[in-house]
Image (tube, rainbow, N blue to C red):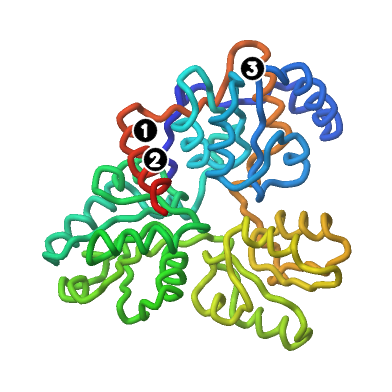
């Protein structure tokens, strides 16, 4: 499921024969030339999980909200977001109406975001409210469709990021007696446990089961209702991998993203958002050793950036975000070519009513101290 808000589904880029015949090297050469030619009109945003040959053309790199907020400060006419769909939506909502946000491949989605649909959230909300008289505050992780951000905005809740999840959840539980957290169960569980909420006070709502697999009594008893969603990359890390790393090298500092399963976070030395992980590595003394549980492109980039430190992936397997990987230099070139021809493609445009309600939730997040 990809909940697309684009100006025209007919605008999905289809390469011409001549473009398909370009070698990878030729693509990079032309991309560098056309980017320089259009530098006054176009800014390229690159998410941390992008591959290096895309990041090489990014004017700004960062996580999803950081990039969207940076884009909002600019006056460039076109913003090419090398990320996934929900990120481009956020950028569109935060930028001005005369700016256009472009996603190089409309099929670059997010498996976690796709695990929570608006219709499913509506059904869950109805069941939860029928099951308790207590006030429930919804919080959504920013990794979700704009329609879900809008739902939260209209129901007194807030958006959160992996960096501020604890602060936002604390706020939510000060506003109500229960929390509905979606779409990532692991970030919700790990954050709430860190805040002192026991696991027995949390339940998981699975939309593939009747009433989420819960009884009204379970909802009434629970303090936190977690959506069943997860990140396909971070879900792949295991407690056994942590044990193996530590057995082979007790000095290795294992740090993971809080989207990892609970048992992985508990077994690790540290956990935190992408920006936290980057900052931790940056400030560590020379000779430090890290096994990092997050997307492989970021891990490899950190290893290359800090040759005086040993940096490896926690997993022996390729922990690649395959949807993020859909954004290729070839499609980035196509986006530039279309702009040059004044026929931009893959424009992401969130309807005004959805954007207005989403921004309510975002503004609440930004107001939380």
What is the x, y in percent for residue 221? 20, 76
- Which corner quadrant holds the C terminus? bottom left
Q: Above or below — where is 326 with respect to 304?
A: above
Reading the chain from its start, which is encountered first: label 2 or label 1? 2
Q: Above or below — where is 47 with respect to 193?
A: above
Reading the chain from its start, which is encountered first: label 3 or label 1? 3
What is the x, y in percent for residue 131? 14, 66
Horizontal side, residue 321 vs residue 137: left or right: right
Mark 2 touching mark 1, by CB under 8 A? Answer: yes
Residue found 66% across the figure and 49% down from its top: 48
Q: Name the element at disc 3.
A: helix
Reading the chain from its start, which is encountered first: label 2 or label 3? 2
Q: Name the element at disc 1.
A: helix
Residue 355's disc is 1
Count of picture labels: 3
What is the x, y in percent for residue 31? 78, 26
Q: Residues within 10 Å of mark 3 (few under 14, many from 20)?
A: some
Question: Most extreme residue toward the front, as rendered?
Answer: 369
Q: Quadrant of residue 225?
A: bottom left
In space, the residues marked 3 and 1 are separated at their CA atoms by 25 Å
On the image, numbered disc 3 is attached to which residue? 339
Residue 146's disc is 2
């Amino acid at each position: 499921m990809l909940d697309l808000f684009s100006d025209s589904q007919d605008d999905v880029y289809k390469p011409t024969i001549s473009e398909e015949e370009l070698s990878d090297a030729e693509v990079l050469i032309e991309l560098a030339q056309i980017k320089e030619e259009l530098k006054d009109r176009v800014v390229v945003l690159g998410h941390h999980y992008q591959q290096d040959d895309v990041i090489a053309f990014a004017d700004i790199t960062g996580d999803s909200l950081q990039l969207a907020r940076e884009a909002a400060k600019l006056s460039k006419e076109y913003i090419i977001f090398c990320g996934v769909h929900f990120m481009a939506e956020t950028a569109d909502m935060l930028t001005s109406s005369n700016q256009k946000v472009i996603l190089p491949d409309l099929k670059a989605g997010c498996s976690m975001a796709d695990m929570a649909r608006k219709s499913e959230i509506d059904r869950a909300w109805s069941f939860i409210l029928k099951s308790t008289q207590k006030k429930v505050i919804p919080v959504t992780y920013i990794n979700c469709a704009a329609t879900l951000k809008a739902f939260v905005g209209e129901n007194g809740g807030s958006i959160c990021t992996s960096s501020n999840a604890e602060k936002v959840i604390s706020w939510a539980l000060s506003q109500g007696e229960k929390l509905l957290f979606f779409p990532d169960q692991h970030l919700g569980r790990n954050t709430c446990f860190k805040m002192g909420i026991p696991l027995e006070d949390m339940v998981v709502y699975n939309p593939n089961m009747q009433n989420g697999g819960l009884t009204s009594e379970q909802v009434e008893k629970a303090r936190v209702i977690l959506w069943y969603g997860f990140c396909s990359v971070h879900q792949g890390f295991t407690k056994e991998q942590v044990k193996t790393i530590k057995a082979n090298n007790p000095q290795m500092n294992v740090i993971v993203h809080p989207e990892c399963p609970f048992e992985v976070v508990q077994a690790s030395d540290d956990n935190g958002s992408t920006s936290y992980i980057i900052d931790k590595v940056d400030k560590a003394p020379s000779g430090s050793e890290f096994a990092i549980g997050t997307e492989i492109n970021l891990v490899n980039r950190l290893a290359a950036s800090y040759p005086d430190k040993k940096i490896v992936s926690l997993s022996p397997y390729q922990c690649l975000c395959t949807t993020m990987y859909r954004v290729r230099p070839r499609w980035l070139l196509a986006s530039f070519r279309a702009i040059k021809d004044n026929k931009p493609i893959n424009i992401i445009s969130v309807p005004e009513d959805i954007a207005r309600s989403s921004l309510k939730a975002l503004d609440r997040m930004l107001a939380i101290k």
